[in-house]
Amino acid sequence: MTVQPLTSPPSVSNSKIITPSSDVKPWPGLIENYRPYLPVTENTPVVTLLEGNTPLIPVPYISQQVGKGVKVFVKYDGLNPTGSFKDRGMTMAISKAKEDGAKAVICASTGNTSAAAAAYATRAGMRPFVIIPDGYVALGKLAQALLYGAEVIAIEGNFDDALTVVKNMAKDYPVTLVNSLNPYRLEGQKTAAFEVVDVLGDAPDWLCIPVGNAGNISAYWMGFCQYHSFGKTNKLPKMMGFQAAGAAPFMAGEPVTNPETLATAIRIGNPANWEKAWGAKDASQGEFNAVTDEEILEAYRILAAQEGIFCEPASAASVAGLLKVKEQVPPESTVVCVLTGNGLKDPDSAIKHSKNQVKSGVKPELSEIAEVMGF
Ligand code: F0G
């Protein structure tokens, strides 16, 4: 058999091939990109799926709803490799666990942390164990954790019970805790604030963010403060944290024993980062507020149907919160709402709460389809 020499396909002329300009560098993942700001050394084995560098998307319909010349953007962290902001923290937590020689990691989770922990631990050659509240984790998240190879244990209890269990497990057994009590998680997550500033050229006036275990709001604040101390921003944003009304311990001023909300990602009654989040709110002269499930769903639908952005219900709490307190937004200000997770994580909620439903039972005939289409 003769082997044909490799030649260019005759129909493609070289002049038409567009090559990337030499100064466009591929994104190296957030640890490499922000290395000087992170607690890593050249001995840290970086475990990365090239997370971070997610888009800051203008949302004109929502801006118009707020009015007063306010510019609203969403930080769409649902575009991370496992579909949520948790990848930012997990690249750091797993890299540092590997540096320390860990063989197994454990987390409690409402779903997203478990997916991220499973993906990064597997990539690092460690065993991921995840403890979840039985029946309260969205389908996509569970599917991810299982396929990435996590050992998933569902307990009869809520997230707060699961967190208590894993804290004790990590004390007594050879497993590293990768919930946001692990300080490296927040170090990774703070890079989202860096990215916002890198795009806007300064901090926004307001940052609206869903609050569950309260790690992310604490991490963003760390990031803004650090960038500010390095002269990368002129100002600091007001931190506006939003909890689901049925799971709003910050509004109650004490832990909530039976948190309930359809936004299962933030169905948390006793946030582990309570003190840090209150510190961020107070230092930034921000506020905590609660949004009802109906307000969350309305924002969820607006984001998808008006802006073309599909996030999960918990993420929409940031936009629901902004719309709820829009009278307080200063005119001409810049607001960033954090969208923490991808809508594909929770297909059941999308189908259940969409105003649009499938028109089924239609015959494959032009006239019938045209009639259904309203022509
Ligand atoms: N949004 C989503 C989509 C989340 O998954 C979470 C937390 C939050 C917001 C709240 O962030 O806890 O830092 O205040 N999910 C955790 C988990 C609890 O297990 O996936 P937080």
Image: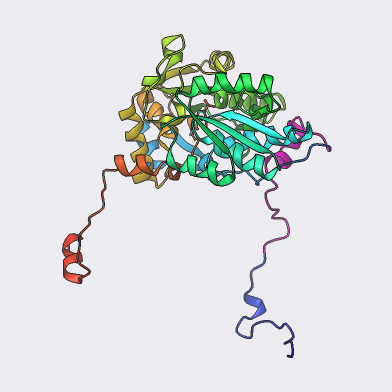
Which residue is pictured at 53% across the width and 39% down the height? 84
**68 lies left or right of 116:** left
Q: Is residue 14 above or below residue 295?
A: below
**235 lies left or right of 287:** right
Percent across and percent down for residue 21 are 69, 61
**194 lies left or right of 22:** left
**215 lies left or right of 122:** left
Q: Is residue 222 magenta?
A: no
Q: Is residue 59 above or below residue 93?
A: below
Which residue is pictured at 59% across the width and 44% down the height? 149
Percent across and percent down for residue 286 are 50, 18
Percent across and percent down for residue 192 are 60, 35
Q: Quadrant of the C terminus?
A: bottom left
Residue range (magenta): 20-42
Can residue 289 be seen here? The reply is: yes
| Picture quadrant where residue 318 is located | top left
Can residue 302 be seen here? The reply is: no
